[in-house]
Image (spheres, grey):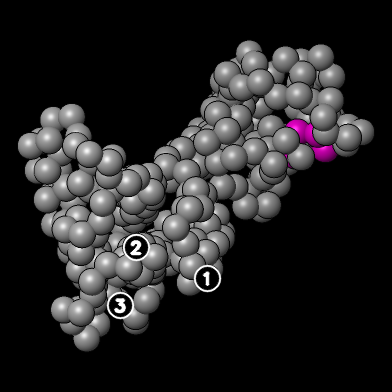
Amino acid sequence: MEGLKSSEIHWVVNNYIGVSGGYLGDFSYASHREFYANYCDLEVDVDAFAEATTRKKFIAILSASEPRDQASILMGIARRFPAGSEMQRSASAYQTLLALAKRCQQVAAVDGQEPKITSDVVQRALAEATTLLKTHGPVSATDRLHTALHGYLRTACRVANLDLTDAPADPRIVYYFKVLRQQHPGFEVPMAQQAAMKNILNSTATLLEQLDPIRNRATLAHANEELISHDEALLVINLVRSLMQYFDAKLRLQKSPS
């Protein structure tokens, strides 16, 4: 997740909303309490935050919120304090506020759940990916998600005691996926729309083949001059997380006895 930095929260509070005499804009205790439901479409328990003043409570709430909720709060601020409503809320400052909200909206939509089939390498890679996504953004996290998926599929093959005797010297992600599809009992369970799902899984193999060149040539895994863009990095992260969740559910299935 790529949320607001402390310096950005400081800018929102002090340079956009404005603080005078310790008061945050024209917020009263009551209007601040109602702000989140009326302007942000959020349910926030303001009393759960122990800070004594409205300004400190607002900072605590904004800091503790997930990026998508931060985006909702920023858009609420834009509605509550539009451009030109005070001198510091210039058109350029308003656009900066909207840009922060847009960035917070552009986060990984698929939750990074820890899979049931795992290993030390997978757990460490997922933890590092989560930290990098939050602190440095999706481009930095892409390499760690690649490692997590690679380690996950390899571990799944080993846990299921699948035959890896034909493995190349340095098996890629797609190799382990193909072994799982061919040998794992979870993939033998009949599916609705079998032909369509087979085509989707065939396409999935094609997608997985593209993760290696992206990781090797467009991430910080190597000294690449051209990196994957923010939006495409989010696409890769959401794709990898979705596939890991699907695989984890599928690979824990066993073929029903005949």
**SS for callout 1:** helix
Q: List the single residue furthest toward the bottom.
A: 169
> What residue range appears in magenta?
55-59
CA–CA distance in space, label 3 to label 2: 37 Å
Along the line of sight, which residue is nearer the eye, 185 or 126? 185
Residue in the image at 16% along x and 47% along y: 201
In this rendering, does residue 137 appear at all? no
Give the Cα distance between marks 2 and 1: 17 Å
Q: Regarding mark 2 in the picture, which secondary structure is present there?
A: loop
Query: Is 224 above or below relative to 7?
Result: below
Q: Are marks 3 and 2 in contact (CB under 8 Å)?
A: no
Residue at the spot of label 2: 160
Q: Position of residue 61 (x, y in %)?
A: 72, 35
Q: Looking at the image, which residue sits at the far front? A: 258
Q: Amino acid at mark 2?
A: Ala
Whole-percent x, y for residue 234 in the image: 36, 50
Q: SS of the residue at dot 3?
A: loop
| Residue at position x 28%, y 40% in the image | 256
Label located before the other in sequence (3 or 2):
2
Q: Is residue 3 left or right of residue 238?
A: right
Tell me what residue is drawn at x 82 percent, y 29 percent: 48
Q: Quadrant of residue 67?
A: top right
> Mark 1 against mark 3, which lies toward the viewer?
1
Q: Position of residue 27 (x, y in %)?
A: 78, 21
Q: Which mark is residue 120?
A: 1
Name the residue carrying label 3. Answer: 224
Q: How many marks?
A: 3
Given the image, on which type of amino acid does mark 3 rest?
Asn
Look at 42% across and 42% down and name the residue there. Answer: 110
Local crowd at mark 1 within 10 Å, few (<14), some, or many (≥20)?
few
Looking at the rendering, in which quadrant would you find the C terminus? top left
